[in-house]
Image (spheres, helix red, strand yellow):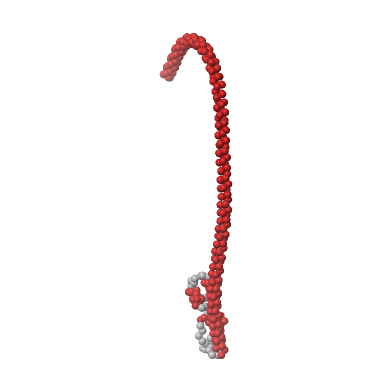
């Protein structure tokens, strides 16, 4: 504890000593500045006296110079006034001459400008007339070309229409001819089938044949198949048992053709498609095409 107190006292004394030294230094500096300011003040006073004397001397010289200058100015003013009067007369004469010259120059420029304006107006009028004529000519040319184009388009349209109509007539004629050939083939086939059916019926009625070979094409109709089966029926009774000796039951079903029961409809439909440009794809369609082209 005692050691800590001694250190604190020592620090306090050191701070007091530093403060006292700073105070002494500040006071010494203040005294030095005061001495310097006193010397400067003395010098300023002496300098002010000298400056006052100099100003007085200079004021006297200025007064003398001012009087001399006033005299010179008055003389110069008189001379300048005379010079101004002379120069004013000369300037007035020059202005009159310049004005006359400017008026003449302006008049010449006006005449030149008016002539240029007249020439420009004349050229513009000629150009306007030329442009108007060119516009009229261009309008006439456009109208003529438009008429020619419209006439060419109408002719081309008529030509295309005629060509299309001719192609349509040709196609329809071909279609009609093909349809007529197909109808003729169908009529001949129908007539042939009818004749064969009539001959078979006549032979049946006459008792010429009870059993005969029948073409598969003739058995495609249901009524024809029923007649064939009715004529070929046989007893179904067994000999070694007591059984019914009536006819065996026959199923009246027509023999199916390769194309089905709607063969004629499909053939007619394909014929229309073939006339319109469709190509055959199946064996049956190729056979039909051979029929169409061989009639």
Residue at (51% x, 76% y) in the render: 292
Residue at (53% x, 89% y) in the render: 209
Residue 99, horizontal then vertical, whole percent:
57, 30
Say whether residue 38 is left or right of residue 115: left
Picture mark count: 0
Quarter of the image where one finds residue 188: bottom right
161 is higher (above) or lower (below) than 81:
below
Name the foreground residue: 151 vs 120. Answer: 120
165 is higher (above) or lower (below) than 13:
below
Q: Quadrant of the N terminus?
A: top left
Residue 203, horizontal then vertical, whole percent:
55, 88
Quarter of the image where one finds residue 70: top right
Residue at (51% x, 70% y) in the render: 277
Name the foreground residue: 36 vs 203. Answer: 36
Name the foreground residue: 274 vs 65. Answer: 65
Name the foreground residue: 138 vs 13. Answer: 138
Say whether residue 192 is left or right of residue 15: right
Residue 182, horizontal then vertical, whole percent:
54, 77
Residue 29, horizontal then vertical, whole percent:
44, 13
- The answer to whether one can see residue 5 in this image is no
- The answer to whether one can see residue 169 in this image is yes
Residue at (55% x, 34% y) in the render: 105
């Amino acid at each position: 504890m005692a050691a800590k107190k001694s250190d604190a006292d020592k620090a306090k004394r050191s701070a007091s000593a530093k403060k006292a030294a700073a105070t002494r230094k500040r006071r010494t500096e203040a005294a030095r500045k005061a001495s310097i300011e006193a010397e400067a003040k003395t010098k300023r006073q002496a300098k002010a006296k000298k400056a006052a004397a100099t100003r007085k001397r200079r004021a006297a010289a200025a007064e003398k110079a001012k009087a001399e200058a006033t005299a010179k100015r008055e003389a110069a003013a008189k001379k300048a006034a005379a010079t101004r009067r002379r120069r004013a007369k000369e300037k007035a004469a020059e202005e009159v001459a310049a004005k006359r010259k400017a008026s003449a120059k302006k008049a010449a420029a006006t005449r030149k400008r008016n002539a240029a304006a007249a020439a420009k107006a004349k050229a513009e009028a000629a150009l306007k007339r030329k442009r108007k004529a060119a516009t009229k000519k261009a309008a006439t040319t456009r109208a003529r070309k438009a008429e020619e184009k419209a006439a060419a388009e109408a002719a081309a349209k008529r030509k295309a229409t005629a060509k299309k109509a001719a192609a349509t007539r040709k196609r329809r004629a071909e279609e009609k001819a093909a349809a007529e050939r197909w109808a003729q083939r169908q009529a001949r086939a129908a007539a042939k089938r009818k004749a064969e059916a009539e001959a078979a019926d006549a032979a049946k009625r006459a008792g010429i044949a009870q059993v005969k070979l029948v073409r598969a094409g003739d058995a495609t109709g249901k009524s024809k198949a029923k007649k064939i089966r009715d004529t070929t029926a046989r007893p179904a009774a067994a000999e070694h048992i007591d059984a019914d000796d009536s006819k065996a039951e026959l199923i009246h079903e027509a023999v199916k053709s390769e194309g089905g029961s709607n063969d004629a409809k499909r053939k007619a439909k394909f014929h229309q498609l073939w006339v319109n440009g469709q190509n055959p794809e199946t064996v049956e369609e190729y056979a039909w095409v051979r029929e169409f082209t061989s009639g």
